[in-house]
Amino acid sequence: FPASKCTPPRILLADFAGTPDAAALVEQFKSRFKTQMLDHHPDYRAVAISVMCSLVALGPEVSTPTMFLAGFSQYDLSFVHVLHKTLSACHVPRHKIEHMATEIVALAGRYGL
């Protein structure tokens, strides 16, 4: 779908400039990401989430039921960096981003997220 008609809205719109739709993502995966970190490439992760085709499958990749119950994280991804980018894209003043991000992370931790 075009970004202008995408639901939910793309908050980090600039990340989609070179990948406006699924066809462009598939082409980039074949020509670029296939030989460079696959779905772990930061540019891929900025616009896509790799998923299983079944909500009940237990493999070979991330198992949705297992990860839903146990949680899932990637050690090669900075969630705080993503939070900073998101707050910036939402026009939070630059001088408030660090404090706000720290507070959000602390709140998430308080609830086990």
Image (tube, rainbow, N blue to C red):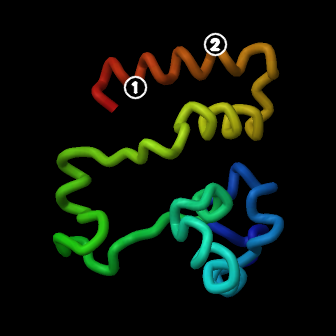
- Residue at the location (37% across, 45% down)? 73
Q: Position of residue 88 (x, y in %)?
A: 76, 33
Examine the image and state in which quarter residue 87 appears.
top right
* Residue tagged 1: 108
Query: Looking at numbered disc 2 in the image, what kind of residue is underneath it?
Result: His
Q: CA distance from mark 1 to mark 2?
A: 14 Å
Q: Position of residue 50 (x, y in %)?
A: 45, 68
Q: Residue furthest front?
A: 35
- The reply to whether dot 1 and dot 2 touch (C-beta < 8 Å) is no
- Residue at the location (36% across, 22% down)? 109
The crowd level at tag 1 (other Cα within 10 Å; few <14, some 14-19, many 20+) is few
**Image quadrant occupied by the N terminus:** bottom right
Camera-nearest residue between 48 and 27: 27
The crowd level at tag 2 (other Cα within 10 Å; few <14, some 14-19, many 20+) is few
* Residue tagged 2: 99
Camera-nearest residue between 50 and 111: 50
Query: Looking at numbered disc 1 in the image, what kind of residue is underneath it?
Result: Ala
Camera-nearest residue between 38 and 70: 38
